[in-house]
Amino acid sequence: MTDRRRRAHIDICALQRPFDRADDLPEDEQEAVAARFAAEVEALEHVLQRSDLVATPAHYAEAARCQDEPRRNYMEALLRTAPIQVPLAPLTLTESARLTAIRAAGIKERDAYHLMYAEAHADVLITVDDDFLTKATKIGTIPACSLTQAQAEIT
């Protein structure tokens, strides 16, 4: 058994959780959603401290498209500090084939890239997107979990 830290591919939605607010939701939902967001921010901090973040071209591309400057700056700074940097390079035939298979399973394009890179470079895929999590759990070749699940599993 190895003492190596787990390599975590955390998708962009999860990395941005500290910026998410419940204020724009219906008033009767705000308290529960705000509590979920707070728990997920705590879980994100825990996971980032106890695992090695994998930063991929999918992360950098999504961060660059973010129109909110403070959010974009935060994501880019966080990604630059990731211990595992996957360089931008043309996809191999194997990666292209896997990406096609993931897309054929009904996963959105951006999420498909996250899953493909996670399978190639990480031990776990972490997301706050329940739909993506359900699909990635069914077709992924590595474990997929929510931030709060990862908090409980990564010690």
Image: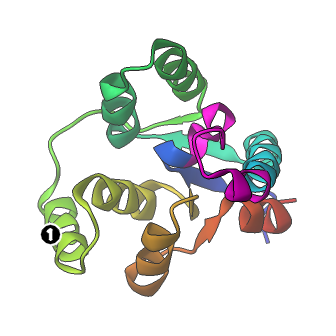
Rendered image quadrant of residue 123: bottom right
Q: Position of residue 119 (x, y in %)?
A: 42, 65
Quadrant of the snapshot with the C terminus: bottom right
Name the residue at 48% across, 43% down: 12
Q: Position of residue 139 (x, y in %)?
A: 38, 83
Which of the pair 78/128 is nearer the observer? 128
Query: Is-magenta flag for residue 31?
Result: yes
Which of the pair 120/66 is nearer the observer? 66
* Colouring convention used in this rendered image of the protein: rainbow
Q: Is residue 104 left or right of residue 88?
A: left
Q: Residue furthest right?
A: 155
Name the residue at 79% across, 40% down: 45
Query: Looking at numbered disc 1 in the image, what kind of residue is underneath it?
Result: Thr
Rendered image quadrant of residue 83: top right
Taking 139 as reference, is 125 above or below it? above
Quadrant of the snapshot with the N terminus: bottom right
Name the residue at 58% across, 58% down: 128
Query: Is-magenta flag for residue 13?
Result: no
Taking 118 as reference, is 153 above or below it? below
Taking 116 as reference, is 25 above or below it? above
Q: Position of residue 130 (x, y in %)?
A: 52, 69
Label 1: how many residues lie within 10 Å, few (<14), some (14-19) or many (20+)? some
Q: Is residue 22 left or right of residue 73?
A: right
Q: Which residues are magenta?
A: 14-33
Q: Which residue is tagged 1?
A: 100
Q: Is residue 17 left or right of residue 134?
A: right
Name the residue at 21% across, 37% down: 89
